[in-house]
Image (cartoon, rainbow, N blue to C red):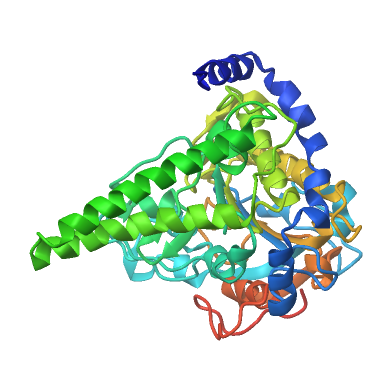
Amino acid sequence: MKTSRPAAASADQHIAAMNRRHFLRGLGACIALPSLASLIPSRVLAAQAAARVGTTASGAPLRTAFVYFPNGAIPRSWWPSGGLTDFSLGPTLQPLAALRSSFQVVSGLDHANAKGGVDGAGDHARGNGVFLTGVRLNKSATDVRAGVSIDQVIANEVGHLTRFPSLEFTCNLDRRSGSCDSGYSCAYQHNLSWRSATTPMPAESNPRLMFERMFGAGAHGTRVANAERRMQARRSVLDFVNEDTRLMRGRLDATDRDKLDQYLTGIRAVEMRIQKAEQFGPNVDPDQATPAGVPSSHTEHVQLMYELLALAFKTDSTRVATFALAPDGDNRSHAEIGIPEGHHDLSHHQNNEERIVKIERIDRWYSEQFAKFLQSLEDTRDIDGKSILHNTRIVYGSGNADANRHSHDNLPVILAGGGGGQLTPGRYVQHGAKPMSNLYLTLAEQAGVTGLARFGDSTGSLTNV
């Protein structure tokens, strides 16, 4: 009897021989077809039309992403000069000039709960952990308490419309536990997305694992069959486990039955994921080789994860995503752009001009990568004929404003995309000391979230977006 082992080995050999740069160049070629309306299951389209959530006025998917860069930005080079529409971009954001009409620079947004107060030091943990939650973090290495992040609030409303309720990306390979920043749990500093106050959503840093999660393992043409075989195997295991636990339950006392129920909760979650996969039918199978893994070049790593995030939106695999480029306090060397010193070390520049110039170069490098991501979305047509970027909202920012001072007022933030016509890009909007959470409340309302009177420390919806 023939098995799939030789085919799998052949796929592995193909992947190992893959040219990574060819993957980066070719990834965009496979996204036009999955963006067609006819490929969205009819039951999903019907649900969208009935609920009016997760879509734009034209019926195209409304996508939301939150992209985090570490250690703030040098204010003098980040902020534009000029007025609402006649502004001039500073050096840091100059790489985005060609997309000027597709984003707005927003100033005056604060995260008061990231400030030290009685908790003292730990601004990097707070900057990271508060960024999408807006709540005060419990300062402890073991008693973790944050809040549900805004991406998960939106995902809870629209996640049923796609194969994945949300996806979490990162380029952070250094995953830690215990105490990280002045007594705060590492969970705050190394997670951007939170399902609950005590449960973060771990992000994926390996491009190959993220690609296979979205589209399945193996070479193009084999992924759908491979995914179906894996699903059938999982279903068989679940059937066995369910039958085994049914027979076992009658022999357990009350305490052990409680333990068994906790175990079965996880089993039921797997069952629900299988049922959802079946609802959406076969996987999208991009005509592209699977990434080999984490590139040795950090620049390629960042670009590859951006490409995968773009692909997730273009194939409607999800409509909600986060991308933590690095955790706040990141001390990575940027030797690839001629800066061998650690980023965090440089960020405490103490007004040393040489250090400031190096930080400005790092800030600009991050903007360059973001610009390529936005251009990819702008160059791709959506099911309504407009660009993917037009039908997307992307918050790009940091939880620290000026890392030298550990400040959390007037955070460096860009709001990119048109939100399907709900946003007004091409502006420099100065909001003047408003909670960052107000912006999140507005984004949730635009996505169709109802009954959310407040979020984090919000004082109301942010207008003039």
User: Looking at this view, is 389 or 107 the one in front?
Assistant: 389
User: Looking at this view, is 251 or 2 the one in front?
Assistant: 2
Q: Residue at x 46, y 59 (%)?
A: 272
Can residue 94 be seen here? The reply is: no
Indicate the quadrant containing the C terminus: top left, top right, bottom left or bottom right: bottom right
User: Looking at this view, is 101 or 206 the one in front?
Assistant: 206
User: Looking at this view, is 302 or 274 the one in front?
Assistant: 274
Q: Residue 387 vs residue 318: left or right?
A: right
Based on the displayed image, in which of its 4 quarters is residue 218 positioned? top right
Based on the displayed image, in which of its 4 quarters is residue 393 positioned? bottom right
Q: Residue 42 placed where, x, y %?
A: 74, 63
**Residue that protrudes farthest toward the front in the picture:** 1
- Identify whether 109 is placed above or below 289: below
Q: Residue 423 placed where, x, y %?
A: 80, 70
Q: Residue at x 64, y 13 (%)?
A: 17
Can residue 259 be seen here? The reply is: yes
Q: Residue at x 74, y 46 (%)?
A: 92
Q: Residue 190 placed where, x, y %?
A: 43, 48
Q: Residue at x 38, y 70 (%)?
A: 117
Task: Give the mark count.
Answer: 0
Based on the displayed image, in which of its 4 quarters is residue 261 positioned? bottom left
